[in-house]
Image (cartoon, rainbow, N blue to C red):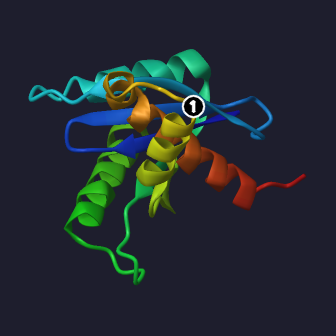
Amino acid sequence: MRKLGLDYGDRRIGAAVSDAFGWTAQGLETIERRRDGSEMERIRRLIEEYEVSEIVVGLPKNMNGTVGPRGEICIEFADQLRETLSLPVHLWDERLTTVSAERVLIEGDVSRKKRKGIVDKMAAVLILQNYLDANSKR
């Protein structure tokens, strides 16, 4: 079964999904966060569409490894996912993934305007791929 990777941000949630073997991560979309909480329904539809069995949420840690206010928000989001969707949710250290995603896009000569729309999706890919690589049974 596939895994869904999420990069939870203040305004957007980047989403990525693994292949059926759990070897590679592919970017899906960037979900806009809304006041009405409709992003949870979009995540539910992605889970159904891609037959997801587990979710990986990026956990932003401070450089010294501690969890700050942003990390606490992501932990609350992961808890909400567990309760709402009844699936295993893993938190994965995502230090510097957005910076890495931005760098990859700059090196790929993606314009600043386009980067804004896809950096969260790219960060989700990096979070999920790092998780898959660390938990590989190959």
In this picture, residue 79 sits left or right of residue 2? left
Q: Secondary structure at mark 1?
A: loop
Location of residue 80 with respect to 73 vertically, above or below:
above
Residue that label 1 marks: 108
* Observer-nearest of 116 and 28: 116
- Residue toward you, 14 or 84: 14
Instruction: In this rendered view, identify the residue nearer to me: 4 or 111.
Output: 111
Whole-percent x and y of residue 131? 63, 54
What is the quadrant of residue 25 in the picture? top right
**Residue at 44% from the left image edge and 43% from the top image edge:** 102
* Front-lying residue, 130 or 74: 130
Around disc 1, counting alpha carbons within 10 Å, would you say few (fewer than 14), some (14 to 19), or many (20 or more)? few
Q: Position of residue 14 (x, y in %)?
A: 40, 34
x 24%, y 61%: residue = 70
Task: Report which quarter residue 10 is drawn in.
Answer: top left
- The answer to whether residue 15 is left or right of residue 116 is right
Q: Quadrant of residue 118?
A: top left
Residue at the extreme right of the image, as rendered? 138
Q: Is residue 24 above or below residue 56?
A: above
Residue at the outermost bottom position = 64
Rendered residue at 52%/29% (across/down): 109
Which residue is rendered at x = 39% and y = 37% of the image? 120
Residue type beneath disc 1: Gly
